[in-house]
Image: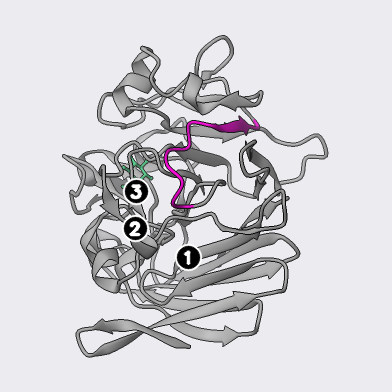
Amino acid sequence: MESFGYLGSVPVGLIRLDNGEISCEVITYGAAIRSLTVPDGNGRPRDVVLGFDTLQEYRKHDCYFGAAIGPVANRISGAACELNGQVLRLTKNDGEACNHSGCAGLNARLWSVMEETDASVTLSCIHPNGLGGIPGELRVAVTYRLRGKALCIEYWAVSSRDTLCSLTNHSYFNLDGHDSGPVNGHRVTLFSHSYTPTDAHSIPTGEIRAVVGTPMDLSHATLLGDRLDLDYEPIRNAGGYDHNWLIDPNDEGMVFRPAALVRSADSGIRMSVYTDRPCVQLYTGNYIPEGLAGKGGALYHRRQGLALETQGFPDAPNHPSFQPITLRAGKAWQSRTEYRFG
Ligand code: BGC
């Protein structure tokens, strides 16, 4: 493991994975994927995820570049909800809401390396009981594994008390390379026919709405540039896409199924996302600050990358119509998401 600076006096490490087809760097702060290099249409390597050069930048900016997110991904409205008849008060970090578990989420913790090979690493972390208002000591492990031209992410968690659990990864992809400007030229398909509408603060209303006939329909390959600036309320409110879609069940009734397909004609790279999660948040980097200094001197812009955060229902505890994200004490929570390149 190489050094990636110090958190106080504690060393932060950087792990390089390489299977001869694709390669990747992971840092122990936030178990964040710092780079992911895949061959383009001409066989030339391109680093397709946004990241920073230093630990200080990972700590300073709340973009969550590449990080593991949890215990509870996405927003909890009013930073409060009920569990077992008791009110949980989480920390507000997004107006009145709690986003991605507040300031004390898994993305801001130091992880330990449990196991490492040339092409895989397993990191673990403990989220202490009550931190950020979330009950239970949550033991979490995340494995990043390169298989062929795919990055496979496996999650495992167990809590000492009944709690809420919905883990994801917050990589921002740019299939032309992390330093190549906004993703407007990417074509996105979501294997979905419905989404969860939100209010002006990105809080779900509780409704599940069909996308047919609206700009939220991404069930056919859609050029992002044609949609991101539409004068359509959900898109206007979020400054682009920043919404949660319900992934269609597949014909064989398999839980692990395709969620999304992204292509860029420029690089010739395509990425398919497979997951066992019920939902996916497509976030088109609308809040990336203009001129943010990224890796290797690159300047990032608004919409420089897009995130496909596979997840449970957002704000689930506050909406009886949504599938719950409750995790019972002692029961293992497991999940798998794959990003496959071609
Ligand atoms: C959210 C965005 C938010 C971003 C960074 C995404 O998952 O959906 O609204 O700006 O994370 O916090």
Read off the residue under disc 2.
Answer: 294
The vertical placement of 21 against 251, above or below, is below
Q: Where ligand 1 lies, by quadrant?
A: top left
The magenta segment is 178-191
Q: Is residue 179 magenta?
A: yes
Tell me the distance, in whole angstroms, between the alpha carbons under discs 1 and 3.
Answer: 17 Å
In the displayed structure image, the side of residue 132 where residue 29 appears, left or right? right
Q: Residues within 10 Å of mark 3 (few under 14, many from 20)?
A: many
The residue under the point 58% across, 86% down is 115
Instruction: Residue under label 1, please give it.
Output: 33
- Within 10 Å of disc 2 (Cα), the crowding (few <14, some 14-19, many 20+) is some
Which quarter of the picture shows residue 64? bottom left
Whether residues under marks 2 and 3 lie with C-beta atoms below 8 angstroms apart, the answer is yes
Amino acid type at image mark 2 = Gly
Local secondary structure at mark 2: loop
Q: Is residue 280 left or right of residue 99?
A: right
Q: Which-is-in-front pick, marks 2 and 1?
A: 2
Q: Residues within 10 Å of mark 1 (few under 14, many from 20)?
A: many
Question: Can you give x and y, in whole percent of width and height, for residue 32 in the image?
Answer: 43, 66
Mark 2 / mark 1, whichever is N-terminal: 1
Nearest to the observer: residue 100 or residue 175: 175
Tell me which numbered mark, 1 or 3, is placed earlier along the sequence: 1
Q: Is residue 97 above or below residue 157?
A: above
User: Which residue is painted at 45% across and 66% down in the image?
Assistant: 34
Disc 2 from disc 3: Cα separation: 6 Å
